[in-house]
Image (spheres, rainbow, N blue to C red):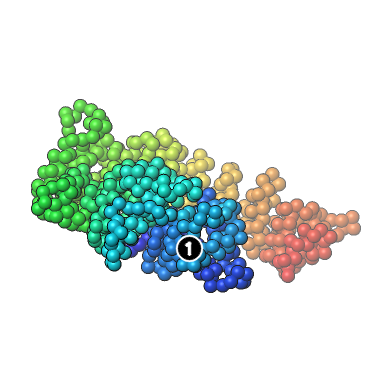
């Protein structure tokens, strides 16, 4: 809802914007400098490089051309941005409707295209109006023309002069450009005499081009121009353009119109487009565009409101002469009011409420089927929608919400809330609280598959009692997927749910205890809570989580280290060895040394233990390291190093790090430095230096 009120334009992505800016600058340089100038190659290479990055994630890169703006990825550029406006105007002067680039793009192709586009239109003529033999495409670059010469628009009079003639020519140009774009095919040589400007034919062509992004962008560009032109246009030709556009929009399939409005960009741009249409287009076209914009923006307009607007449009078109201007003005005023706050400024809310109440009694067929034998009861979701529109909450709405929640239709209510009117804030909060109540969460938690997206939206409104329901679900659910989703989300709460969680630690199932301990690691333990009972649990999976948590408790860290290092489960031993890597406390030295010297222990854990001994300054750690690297004596009775195994190398490195000048360790370090084995030398060389 708030997005509709924001006037600022949502801009293009940074990559697309930078590409278009670089293209505009490169085109300007090609217009300024002669061929072969050093600046041209750098500009061409820059455009090619940016295009290649964009084409890594798409097969083609297409942007449509309007008079003062470009349309790319469904977003129209800001017509007041001077660099992009200059690019759009330059391409439009060449009578081009779109430019498309594809993978495999080469710099020389971009260079040739830029050189062609930099030609003076007044001297060489527009590329889009060039003879059929003139090249407009290369292997990976194509300039799509919009040709409208030799076409005539019914209603243009050759006797028009002055300002009227200019306005008529502009209107004719817009409609013919739209018709040419709509009827365009991949065969650029198709004779323009065959192009029809009949609105129904143009609409049919647009309907049949579903999924063609470049095509849609060009059509949207012309619709944006027409809507803007009709805001202030007067005279016979503007009236003709208004009628033809209304017939075109009326003939389009609803899905097509929604597709085109969605292609027009963000919510603010759609709002601007509808406002422009409201100011100038025929009223029946305004209603169709409004409905399409609401769908594309995720807004909700009740059926009653749509019927009222349609009725006003009908009176504005074919009503009595004295009624038509009143209905026309009322329709445009209501659309403006709706767009300003996405709500109806109804002078008689009681009457409007009765109309909506009547509409709510006609539930869709699928809803009646789901209701079963409820005796013709109205669709409760319609009542909820009316409650939001009227800003009122009462017993009827409360019962309707009970039914909606009982049917598990949380997502439908959340969709209504996402597009609710501005004045519905208190009602929206009541509906959200109703869905986040413990009884409602029980229904949500019982759904299969579990709807984690709905829970995500309800989470800020969930109370401590609601968390109790979710924790019960975490304990009782047989679905591993449900348990995982709940674990991930519950761990993010900011409420103090530690006391709730600890109550489940007496459960008989290991996985329940393990899951609760995992949650406690992400949250806050109750003061004075001890992990000792669970650090000694018979199941290693529980012990693993308990010791991880116990290591975070200053009062129990030493006990946790001893418990982990003495555990028979290697995964837990790894936890203990990982914890002493930065600092190996004196009480743990003997245990760590025993692990390092244990030849039956896996090498990975022996290596961790050896590194940890190097962090200690306890003589017991030094003695253990000396034992690791001791290779006995030579035949002459001199000490020698052990074979250069990874454990021996790690031991030497630890000695050189912790005891480089120790009188006992120094001779061993000297032996390594004098060794013929490069690995042994390297182990002590770095530390010794």
What is the x, y in percent for residue 281? 25, 54
What is the x, y in percent for residue 220? 37, 53
Residue bearing the label numbered 1: 125
Question: Few, some or many C-alpha atoms within 10 Å of disc 1 (few <14, some 14-19, many ≥20)?
Answer: some
Kindly give the residue lying farthest to the top in the view shown: 373
Picture quarter with the N terminus: bottom left
Residue 312 can be seen in this image: no
Picture quarter with the C terminus: bottom right
Q: Is residue 406 above or below residue 394?
A: above
Q: In this view, does 292 lie to the left or right of 685?
A: left
What is the x, y in percent for residue 154? 30, 51
Residue 244 can be seen in this image: yes
At x 10%, y 48%, the residue is 320
What is the x, y in percent for residue 539? 51, 39
Q: In this view, does 252 lie to the left or right of 191?
A: left
Q: Is residue 538 above or below residue 285?
A: above
């Amino acid at each position: 809802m708030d997005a509709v009120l924001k006037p600022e334009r949502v801009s293009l992505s940074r990559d697309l914007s930078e590409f278009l800016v670089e293209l505009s600058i490169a085109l300007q340089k090609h217009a300024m400098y002669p061929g072969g100038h050093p600046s041209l190659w750098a500009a061409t290479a820059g455009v090619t490089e940016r295009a290649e990055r964009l084409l890594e994630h798409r097969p083609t890169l297409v942007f449509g051309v309007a008079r003062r703006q470009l349309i790319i990825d469904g977003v129209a550029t800001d017509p007041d941005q001077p660099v992009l406006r200059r690019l759009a105007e330059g391409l439009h002067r060449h009578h081009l409707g779109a430019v498309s680039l594809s993978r495999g793009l080469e710099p020389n192709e971009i260079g040739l295209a830029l050189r062609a586009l930099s030609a003076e239109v007044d001297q060489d003529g527009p590329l889009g109006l060039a003879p059929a033999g003139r090249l407009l495409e290369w292997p990976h670059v194509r300039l799509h023309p919009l040709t409208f010469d030799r076409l005539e628009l019914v209603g243009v009079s050759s006797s028009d002069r002055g300002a009227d003639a200019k306005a008529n020519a502009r209107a004719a140009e817009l409609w013919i450009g739209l018709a040419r774009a709509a009827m365009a095919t991949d065969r650029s040589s198709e004779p323009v005499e065959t192009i029809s400007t009949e609105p129904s034919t143009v609409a049919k062509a647009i309907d049949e081009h579903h999924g063609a992004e470049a095509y849609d962008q060009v059509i949207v560009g012309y619709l944006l121009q027409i809507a803007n032109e009709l805001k202030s246009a007067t005279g016979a030709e503007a009236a003709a353009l208004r009628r033809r556009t209304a017939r075109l929009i009326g003939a389009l399939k609803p899905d097509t119109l929604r597709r085109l409005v969605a292609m027009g960009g963000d919510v603010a741009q759609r709002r601007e487009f509808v406002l422009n249409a409201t100011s100038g287009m025929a009223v029946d076209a305004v209603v169709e565009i409004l409905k399409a914009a609401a769908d594309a923006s995720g807004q909700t307009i009740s059926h009653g409101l749509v019927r009222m607007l349609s009725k006003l449009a009908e009176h504005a078109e074919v009503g009595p002469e004295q009624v038509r201007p009143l209905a026309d003005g009322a329709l445009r005023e209501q659309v403006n009011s709706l767009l300003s706050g996405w709500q109806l400024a109804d002078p008689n809310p009681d009457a409007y409420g009765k109309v909506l109440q009547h509409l709510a009694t006609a539930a869709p067929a699928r809803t009646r089927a789901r209701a079963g034998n409820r005796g013709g009861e109205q669709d409760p979701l319609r009542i909820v929608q009316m409650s939001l529109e009227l800003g009122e909450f009462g017993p009827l709405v409360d019962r309707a919400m009970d039914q909606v929640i009982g049917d598990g239709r949380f997502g439908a209510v959340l969709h209504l809330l996402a597009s609710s009117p501005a004045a519905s804030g208190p009602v929206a909060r009541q509906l959200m609280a109703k869905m986040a109540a413990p009884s409602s969460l029980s229904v949500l938690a019982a759904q299969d598959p579990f709807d984690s997206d709905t829970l995500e939206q309800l989470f800020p409104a969930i109370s401590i009692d609601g968390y109790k329901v979710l924790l019960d679900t975490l304990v009782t659910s047989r679905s591993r997927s449900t348990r995982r989703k709940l674990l991930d989300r519950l761990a993010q709460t900011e409420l103090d749910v530690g006391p709730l969680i600890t109550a489940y630690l007496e459960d008989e199932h290991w996985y329940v205890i393990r899951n609760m301990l995992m949650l406690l690691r992400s949250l806050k333990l109750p003061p004075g809570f001890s992990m000792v009972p669970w650090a000694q649990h018979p199941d290693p999976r529980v012990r693993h989580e308990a010791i991880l948590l116990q290591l975070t408790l200053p009062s129990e860290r030493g006990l946790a280290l001893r418990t982990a290092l003495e555990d028979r489960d290697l995964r837990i031993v790894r936890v203990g060895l990982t914890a002493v890597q930065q600092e190996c406390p004196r009480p743990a030295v003997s245990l760590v040394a025993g692990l390092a010297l244990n030849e039956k222990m896996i090498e990975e854990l022996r290596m961790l233990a050896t590194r940890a001994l190097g962090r200690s300054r306890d003589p017991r750690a030094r003695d253990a390291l000396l034992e690791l690297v001791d290779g006995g004596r030579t035949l002459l009775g001199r000490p020698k190093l052990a074979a250069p195994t990874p454990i021996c190398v790690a031991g030497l490195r630890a000695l050189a790090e912790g005891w480089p000048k120790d009188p006992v360790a120094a001779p061993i370090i000297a032996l390594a430095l004098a060794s013929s084995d490069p690995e042994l030398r390297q182990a002590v060389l770095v530390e010794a230096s």
